[in-house]
């Protein structure tokens, strides 16, 4: 399969200016285990999960950079990918809280965000079934020292000749979040904002 059949999906950070992130997770018990939402098991994550964010910036981006590397997408971005094809995932409700409003002023007596304080058009995506597309014969890699089905490091990443979901993680190396070529075309056609598509030649 041509290496241009898929790309690593990353957020683009040119809009950040002096900020490190667009959004920062409001911590909860066990949040340390959720970095990147890489595990395919049922992580204990509250729904909705809250992030403090620059509300004005969120109006202009679809894939915000956050301090826990969750794949957080606008509703339009997720629907665009689902329009290409099915990918097995868990969608986690995310509410963005205006980071210019103090904590005491964000919620009413019932614990709900006050009007004008929150943006609810985003959600986090946890891939719940890995794709077996890693070509063990043509790829160049260092095997994982203890897990036979995983690799430790890849020098050359080649995918099998097979249909790919629009969004996926590889069972052999679940770290990178990948998008198929068809998924990339759909995202670009829909003008989904602030994305980077990294060639598999550069996934190391």
Image (cartoon, grey):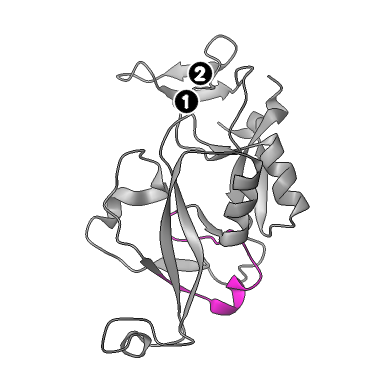
Q: Percent position (x, y) of residue 79? A: 60, 53
- Whether the magenta-drawn stretch holds residue 33 is answered as no
Q: Which residues are magenta?
A: 51-70
138 sits to left or right of 150: right
Question: Residue pushed farthest left?
Answer: 29
Do the residues under discs 2 and 1 have CB atoms within 8 angstroms?
A: yes
- Whether the magenta-drawn stretch holds residue 66 is answered as yes
Q: Residue at x 66, y 70 (%)?
A: 60
Q: Residue at x 70, y 35 (%)?
A: 181
Q: Is residue 18 above or below residue 195?
A: below
**Hey, which quadrant is residue 191 in on the image?**
bottom right
Q: Nearer the viewer, residue 56 or 95?
A: 95
Q: Nearer the viewer, residue 146 or 56?
A: 56
Q: Is residue 1 above or below residue 87?
A: above
Residue that label 1 marks? 153
Mark 2 or 1 closer to N-term? 2
Q: Could you classify mark 1 by the number of other residues whose Cα lies within 10 Å: few (under 14), some (14-19), or many (20 or more)?
A: some
Q: Could you classify mark 2 by the number of other residues whose Cα lies within 10 Å: few (under 14), some (14-19), or many (20 or more)?
A: some
Picture quarter with the C terminus: top right
**Hey, which quadrant is residue 64 in on the image?**
bottom right
118 sits to left or right of 107: right
Residue 57: give its label: none
Q: Percent position (x, y) of residue 20? A: 52, 66
Could you tell me which secondary element the residue under label 2 belongs to? strand
Picture quarter with the N terminus: top right
Q: Percent position (x, y) of residue 144? A: 37, 20
Q: Percent position (x, y) of residue 176? A: 51, 38
Q: Residue at x 60, y 11 (%)?
A: 138
Could you tell me which secondary element the residue under label 1 belongs to? strand
Q: Main secondary structure of the magenta part?
A: loop
Q: Nearer the viewer, residue 64 or 203?
A: 64
Residue that label 2 marks? 141
């Amino acid at each position: 399969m041509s290496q241009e059949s898929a790309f690593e999906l990353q957020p683009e950070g040119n809009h950040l200016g002096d900020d490190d992130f667009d959004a920062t997770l409001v911590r909860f018990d066990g949040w340390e285990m959720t970095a990147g939402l890489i595990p395919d098991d049922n992580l204990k994550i509250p729904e909705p999960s809250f992030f403090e964010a620059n509300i004005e910036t969120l109006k202009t981006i679809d894939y915000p950079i956050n301090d826990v590397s969750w794949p957080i997408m606008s509703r339009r971005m997720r629907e665009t990918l689902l329009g290409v094809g099915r990918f097995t995932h868990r969608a986690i409700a995310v509410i963005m809280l205006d980071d210019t409003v103090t904590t005491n002023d964000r919620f009413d007596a019932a614990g709900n965000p006050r009007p004008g304080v929150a943006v609810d058009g985003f959600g986090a995506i946890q891939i719940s079934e890995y794709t077996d597309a890693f070509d063990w014969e043509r790829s160049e890699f260092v095997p994982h020292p203890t897990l036979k089905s995983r690799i430790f490091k890849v020098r050359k990443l080649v995918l099998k000749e097979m249909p790919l979901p629009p969004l996926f993680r590889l069972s052999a190396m679940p770290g990178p979040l990948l998008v198929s070529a068809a998924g990339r075309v759909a995202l670009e056609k829909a003008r989904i904002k602030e994305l980077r598509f990294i060639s598999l030649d550069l996934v190391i």
